[in-house]
Image (cartoon, coloured by chain):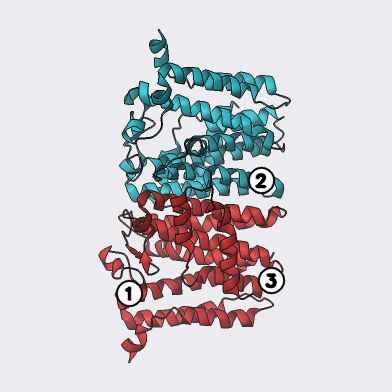
Chain colours: A cyan, B red
């Protein structure tokens, strides 16, 4: 099975009971709506790629880790789109969950997805406390307070935002979680995989900033110009489009260089280059021309 | 240490890093505000009491289980009070989190408390996969979809609400989670402890319905008359105050009778009677007189 098929199958399996026939129908519908169809599934792709590079000794474990990371990403999108935050009507090219299902169901959908992420890990790793504790801890650190994506979002409520802490937490933390979780699911020490996650996360953030400036809403599948509207720091606004593009190129190289020695390092390097090259908005070709 | 001191100390310990100096200051403040000072801490008291009745072979494990259950309870209060749900300004006699800290921080506080609950379990049970997987599963079932408190809240968005499913999920699930978690933390098969949790949960729901009808807001520390305002089923409205009081007495007896054979059954029975007797609103004395 291709990684993308593995990811969808694992997400379907995780969702079966939570969005099953005994659940409140609107909540069940919103849970599926928030997860399917997905975006590029970049984070779970990274989990599986790192696990494969580490020898892929536990394919089902890697699937569970990838699922947990993607469910938490989906949860963060649902909550970030709420009226109290970005108030975004559009996500992945369709109505945001709170628009389609109402605000109460949207809050609860995010909550239920967070719970489901941890439940998925516990179901898979019930015979291996070292892996279960390690993965739960990795995932919790990537999402919670003081430095996960929830903390990243919370920095936006502060008058003074330390830029590095903000971006590391808001975007970087879940990419770090993805590389660490991939290694941990393969039974390998996750710590050496942190730098790779950080470089991918920073690259993704710069690309997202470029897209917010360059794309139109239809191409992007979500509202544009949100950073300027919300006074959020934006690399393309700070460095100019050319400067941000150069920064992104540098981060792609940094990511490729950050891969620790492992059985599948070369294949992973190729995959990481392809994924991060895909970050470049296609409008950049026009801008550069 | 008394159970109540153990609970506060364990909650403080769990909170230390999440609400520490590297967290965004408003989020850190709101996390502490949502958890301290607490209400009666009934659910973690039940966790510790069940663990003690089962022989209390792992006091620190019981503390972690009690902490996880209470953090999830606090998370549910923060989200339930949001404008999209109860829009309640008052909680535990002070401004609700979204009133004191704003709606974005309130959503994130609930999210972070959910994450912290699972992280607390993983930290304590990192050497015991059976307990960690079991407790994670118990806690996830008590909170998530299809039948935890998140699902209970989601039933309020449905046009037709199956009353038993609604009340079991909305209030009962976390009491069931408390008795199961107490047993599991002591290394005992949790399943026989389900009926006790269900009886306590139903008793609590009837008592809450009575309070919603009988008390004033100042005594209750939260708005009153919410059920009628939100067209929620209410036992006191359906059965009359006398009928609801009789139902509550029956459930207190049922709870005492549901305790499985265990080393500390008698002590637990006394404690459960005292706790559930405490559910009776003191206004009932006036009503009965």
Which residue in the structure is indicated by mark 1? B218
Q: Relative to B85, does residue A61 appear above or below in the rendering?
A: above
State the residue at coordinates (65%, 73%).
B52
Helix, strand, or loop for circle 2?
A: helix
Which residue in the structure is indicated by mark 3? B56
Q: Check whether the beta carbons of the residues at disc 2 and disc 3 lie within 8 A of each other.
A: no
What is the crowding at mark 1: few (fewer than 14 residues within 10 Å), some, or many (at least 20)? few
Residue A93 seen: yes
Q: Earlier in the sequence, mark 1 or mark 3?
A: 3
Could you give the CA–CA distance between mark 2 and mark 3, rounded to whole angstroms? 26 Å
Q: Relative to B133, does residue B202 appear above or below in the rendering?
A: below
Residue B147 seen: no
Helix, strand, or loop for circle 3?
A: loop
Image quarter where the N terminus of chain B lies is bottom right
Tell me the subunit letter for badge 3: B
Could you give the CA–CA distance between mark 2 and mark 1, rounded to whole angstroms? 45 Å
Could you give the CA–CA distance between mark 1 and mark 3, rounded to whole angstroms? 38 Å
x, y (%) of residue B192? 61, 68
Horizontal side, residue B94 vs residue A42: left or right: left
The verdict on a common chain for dots 1 and 3 is yes
What is the crowding at mark 3: few (fewer than 14 residues within 10 Å), some, or many (at least 20)? many
Tell me the subunit letter for badge 1: B
Which residue in the structure is indicated by mark 2? A134
x, y (%) of residue A160? 42, 42
Tell me the subunit letter for badge 2: A
Q: Relative to A185, does residue B285 appear above or below in the rendering?
A: below
Residue furthest to the top in view is A289
Residue furthest to the left in view is B229
Image quarter where the C terminus of chain B lies is bottom left
Q: Nearer the viewer, residue A39 or A77?
A: A77
Give the number of the disc on residue A58. none
């Amino acid at each position: 099975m291709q990684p993308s098929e593995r990811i969808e199958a694992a997400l379907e399996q995780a969702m079966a009971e939570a969005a099953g026939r005994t659940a409140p129908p609107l909540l069940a519908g919103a849970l599926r709506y928030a997860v399917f169809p997905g975006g590029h599934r970049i984070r779970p792709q990274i989990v599986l790629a790192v696990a494969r590079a580490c020898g892929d000794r536990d394919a089902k474990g890697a699937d569970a880790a990838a699922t947990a990371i993607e469910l938490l990403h989906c949860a963060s999108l649902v909550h970030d789109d709420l009226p109290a935050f970005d108030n975004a009507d559009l996500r992945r090219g369709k109505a945001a969950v709170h628009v389609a299902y109402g605000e109460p169901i949207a809050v609860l959908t995010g909550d239920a997805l967070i719970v489901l992420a941890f439940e998925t890990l516990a179901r898979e790793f019930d015979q291996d406390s070292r892996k279960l504790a390690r993965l739960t801890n990795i995932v919790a650190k990537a999402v919670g307070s003081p430095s996960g994506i929830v903390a990243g979002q919370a920095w936006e409520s502060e008058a003074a935002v330390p830029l590095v802490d903000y971006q590391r937490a808001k975007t970087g933390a879940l990419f770090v979680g993805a590389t660490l979780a991939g290694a941990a699911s393969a039974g390998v020490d996750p710590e050496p995989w942190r730098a790779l996650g950080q470089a991918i996360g920073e690259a993704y953030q710069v690309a997202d900033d470029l897209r917010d400036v360059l794309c139109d809403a239809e191409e992007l599948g979500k509202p544009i110009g949100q950073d300027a509207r919300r006074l959020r720091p934006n690399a393309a606004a700070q460095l100019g489009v050319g400067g941000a593009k150069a920064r992104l190129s540098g981060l792609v190289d940094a990511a490729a260089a950050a891969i620790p020695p492992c059985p599948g390092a070369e294949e992973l390097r190729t995959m990481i280059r392809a994924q991060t090259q895909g970050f470049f908005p296609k409008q950049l070709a026009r801008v550069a021309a």
